[in-house]
Image (cartoon, rainbow, N blue to C red):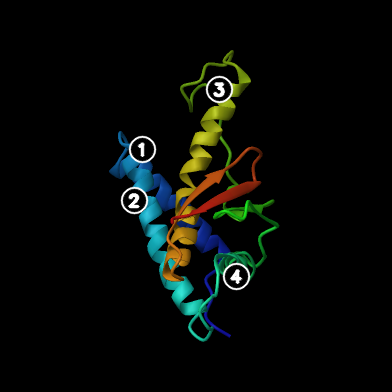
């Protein structure tokens, strides 16, 4: 049995990393903050896939590697498998996690003192701010997935879609 890190420590680290990059280091440059967070995730995913595939043969195709990410890799990181995998059989895969752990505790304080939204603002404006805040927490796991797949010899682009917290879909597009 390998060493493990407490989930609360990892959650706190992710929250602090996003907060630091968004509010302190790159407060006026959210694109740069997102890129830095994704790069850290990429390095983590690259190293973790190296560790978890050390004694495995190379994957023969894209689908085999994606299944590894959905089952074994996700289980190592989140102690559960991806809930749903879809593909168009042309290099695009959608990995859906119905209770993505890193989004379960995200909320937006909609009080007038803590945001730029007035009390009589439309509800969708508050939801939009919540989605923006949550999306910053998704660059790290997108980087993890991209780093892992790149290490497996599958260069790709990864994006995330959140329509209802804590459900999260990761869209993986293989580069040709």
Q: In the image, residue 1 lies at what x, y percent? A: 58, 85
Where residue 36 is drawn, which disc sits there? 2
Crowdedness of circle 4 by 10 Å Cα count: few (<14), some, many (20+)?
few
Which residue is rendered at x = 53% and y = 83% of the image? 57
Q: CA distance from mark 2 to mark 1?
A: 10 Å
Which residue is rendered at x = 50% and y = 79% of the image? 58
Q: In the image, residue 35 lies at what x, y percent? A: 35, 48
Crowdedness of circle 3 by 10 Å Cα count: few (<14), some, many (20+)?
few
From what the image shows, is residue 80 above or below residue 34?
Answer: below
Of 115 and 30, the residue lying toward us: 30
Q: CA distance from mark 3 to mark 1?
A: 19 Å
Asked whether, in this view, residue 96 is left or right of residue 2, the answer is right
In primary-sequence order, the first of circles 4 and 2 is 2
Q: CA distance from mark 4 to mark 2?
A: 29 Å
Residue denoted by label 1: 30
Q: Secondary structure at mark 4?
A: helix
Examine the rendering and report whether any part of residue 46 can be seen: yes
In primary-sequence order, the first of circles 4 and 1 is 1
In primary-sequence order, the first of circles 2 and 3 is 2
Residue denoted by label 4: 64
In primary-sequence order, the first of circles 2 and 1 is 1
In primary-sequence order, the first of circles 3 and 1 is 1
Asked whether, in this view, residue 91 is left or right of residue 176, the answer is right
Asked whether, in this view, residue 173 is left or right of residue 164, the answer is left
Q: CA distance from mark 4 to mark 3?
A: 41 Å
From what the image shows, is residue 26 above or below residue 118?
Answer: below
For the residues bearing labels 4 and 2, Cβ distance under 8 angstroms: no
For the residues bearing labels 2 and 3, Cβ distance under 8 angstroms: no
Residue denoted by label 3: 125
């Amino acid at each position: 049995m390998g060493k493990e890190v407490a989930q609360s420590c990892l959650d706190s680290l992710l929250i602090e990393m996003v907060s630091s990059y968004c509010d302190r280091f790159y407060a006026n440059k959210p694109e740069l903050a997102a890129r830095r967070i994704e790069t850290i995730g990429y390095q983590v995913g690259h190293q973790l896939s190296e560790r978890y595939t050390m004694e495995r043969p190379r994957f023969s195709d894209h689908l085999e590697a994606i299944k590894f990410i959905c089952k074994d890799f996700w289980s190592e990181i989140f102690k559960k498998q991806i809930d749903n995998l879809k593909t168009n059989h042309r290099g695009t895969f959608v990995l859906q996690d119905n209770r993505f752990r890193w989004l379960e505790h995200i909320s937006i304080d909609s009080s007038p003192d803590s945001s730029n939204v007035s009390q009589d603002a439309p509800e969708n404006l508050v939801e939009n701010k919540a989605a923006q805040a949550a999306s910053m927490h998704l660059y790290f796991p997108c980087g993890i997935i991209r780093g892992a797949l790149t290490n497996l010899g599958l260069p790709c682009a990864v994006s995330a879609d959140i329509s209802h917290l804590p459900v999260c879909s990761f869209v993986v597009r293989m580069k040709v």
